[in-house]
Amino acid sequence: MRFAIVTRRKWFFLLSGSITLAGIIVMLIFGLNLGTDFKAGAQIQVQLNQSFRSAQVQQAFSTVGLSVPTGAVTSAGTNGQTAVVRLGTTLTATQEAAINTALHKEFPKALVPAEFSSVDPMIAKEQSQTAIWAVALASLGIVVYVAIRFEYRFAVSGIVALLHDAFIVISFFALLRIQVDLPFIAAVLTIVGYSINDTIVIFDRIRENMKAAKVKTLRELEELVDHSLWQTMTRSINTVLTVLFAAITLFLFGGSSIHNFTFALLIGLVSGAYSSIFIASPLWVVWRSRSFGKSKKKRAVA
Amino acid sequence: MIKWGRLTTFFVLVVLIFGIIFSTSKMLYTRIPLGLDLQGGIDVLYQIGSNGQTVTTSDITATVAALSNRINVLGVSEPQIQVENGNRVRVDLAGKFNQLQARQFLSQEANLAFKSPTGQVLMTGKDVKDNAHYEADPTTGAPDVAITFKDAAKFEAITQKYLHQRVSIWLNNKMIDDPTIQSVISGGNAVIQGSPSVQEAVNLAKLLNAGALPLPLHELSSMTVGPSLGQAALHATLIAALVAVILIFVFMILIYRLPGVVAVLSLCAYIYLVIAVFAGLQVTLTLTGLAALVLGIGMAVDANIITYERIKDELRNGKSLQSSVVSGQRKALRTILDANVTTLIAGIVMYWYGTGDVRGFGVALITSILVSLMTAVFLSRTLLQLLTRANLVKNSWLYGAKRKVAASK
């Protein structure tokens, strides 16, 4: 006896709906912690190779005439020995050189020259617009392709699942106050690609089973989709496991500069595997069942 | 009966794949250009001219030429200069060099002008040969920059016309020297005095040789990564990749047994081909790109998983081992194509729309999808069919099916 997924769809819709709602609330209250790429200024990321206090970093910066507010120093990396400093203004080459010297003096084990990035307000604004357009365009391209190869209901259900995944990752980042930068956009786009990839494999099986069977009632449709889900379940689990192996090792060993990036991937991949099974397919059932629901009901009444 | 011909072909293919991998992969790997996040360097985006200023195509061409001259003078190899969005230019310099000096040098203006007492421009930096060099003043020992004019006759005429008058020398609209012409100078040699230090005189000479910028450059964004930091990131990511690959290999062999081994073989070919594509097309490998490739391994495995699950389905339906493999592969192919095309769309959008990191990620994603289709589908397919048709293995347990199924056969 296998677990019936489609008939329990209300619970999954409720779960995902409430996570999404929580995400919206968090975003409205706190907003995203935008990085330098989207919010002009400068960012310095340096591997100090020792534990540190924010005050020490602030002290190093004050020796070169830069005042750093308390909240602007955060730690990163698997062991928290990397300092990330945010400044409101861009830095010149001379300032960067001075910061390197000051950091080395305060933290002898630090890996200098550090990583600096400075972004002008004009570029920051453009980059945020480009990011939104990129996600929108990718989604649109996928909808068109799936609508042509399958049908529009599959396309829209797939996209809902995909946006759900992108949104869950964004909510996590808003909630945990993790910085959102350009690689984060690449991560979201990968999740978009992976999520739809995962969904298509299941939809393909549903389409194949639909050809063989004559489905007339909601009950039969639920059965068929459940059967398809379980037929592809081993593949869904094994695939997400292998991709997770890659993402987890990158997260643990891949260096501090892609830490946030791989964290986004981790959440997105898990969410992508979940939504393909528990959101996309049940959603399609609800929609598809309407097409024969009308004629059936009439006959039942008569 | 075992068909030795097919079995031999299988092993020849395997030996061939590993032969190529072992003999050439190291050479190819060292040829891949690394992004600045993996070997250190600077990336600066400049705006040409001031806000709202109209910039002509010739201004842009001249700016790019001036920048590449300056990079040449710095001695940084393989620079990347790209024009973006009409009036912007992005400079990527990777490797070990003095980052502070390079960044200052790139955008420093060097507009030299020789003016008459009435302020008329007589000569500019364009009239000077590119052999300017530092010289200690013979009498005072102060740092000077010695220059030679391209047109010695023109300079001679000027010295004649303004004999016993002052001809001022201006650098970036600031007067740096105001000498009186003592005698008519032939031969076109002159000296610019007034450099505050030897270092500045050397720098000015270099700038004059590299040529002036047609319009001032304004830094819009910049990114600098120290060389040791870049190497640390590369090292860390490669270790992560190695661990991920080993985990995935072990997983595939444990779960899918014989086809799992075939999957591992084709994954080795995948990794090799990706390296070959990056080296062959000289695609710059960035940190996010490397992450995309590692993730791509996970996705390349998916094509194998889809196929092997299909084969198991066919076995469960009571088909023979050989026909299960053939029909399983055929049915899986359409699914794999549809799934990969959708991911490809995301990759193309990233490449087409993104810059920097996002673009690098897009390139890697596109490469990994195309290569994985080649290896995970065609190579893995051929290898598995050869192995199955060789009739060596008759036990479907080895194909990942349950023992019960195998026993009932």
Image: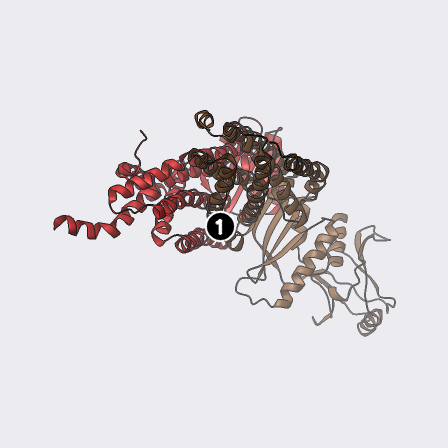
Query: Residue A118's x, y, as percent?
Result: 54, 47
In the picture shown, does residue B407 fall above or below B97? above
Quadrant of the rendered structure where residue A188 is?
top left
Query: Residue B361's x, y, as percent?
Result: 54, 46
| Residue placed most toward the observer, A259 or A195 | A195
**Residue beneath the point at 80% across and 57% down:** B132
Task: Tell me, by letter, which chain the rendering colours brown.
Answer: B
| Residue placed most toward the observer, B237 or A210 | A210
Q: Residue A98, can we see it?
A: no
Q: Is mark 1 on a helix, strand or loop?
A: helix
In the picture shown, does residue B170 fall above or below A261? below
Farthest-out residue, front:
B1
Report the coloring of the rendering: by chain
User: In the rendered image, which residue does mark 1 sit on?
Assistant: B341
Count up the numbered dots.
1
Would residue B318 appear left or right of B43 to someone viewing this image? left
**Residue beneath the point at 70% across and 42% down:** B28
Q: Mark 1 lies on which chain?
A: B
- The N terminus of chain B is located in which quarter? top right
Query: Residue B173's x, y, as percent?
Result: 66, 62
Question: How many residues crowd around disc 1 within 10 Å: few (fewer than 14), some, or many (20 or more)?
Answer: some
**Residue beneath the point at 63% across and 66% down:** B59
Image colour for chain A is: red
Would residue B256 appear left or right of B201 to someone viewing this image? left
Residue type at mark 1 is Val
Quadrant of the rendered structure where residue A15 is?
top left
Query: Residue A195's x, y, as percent?
Result: 43, 43
Farthest-out residue, left:
A302
Q: Residue A202, can we see it?
A: yes
**Residue beneath the point at 62% across and 60% down:** B216
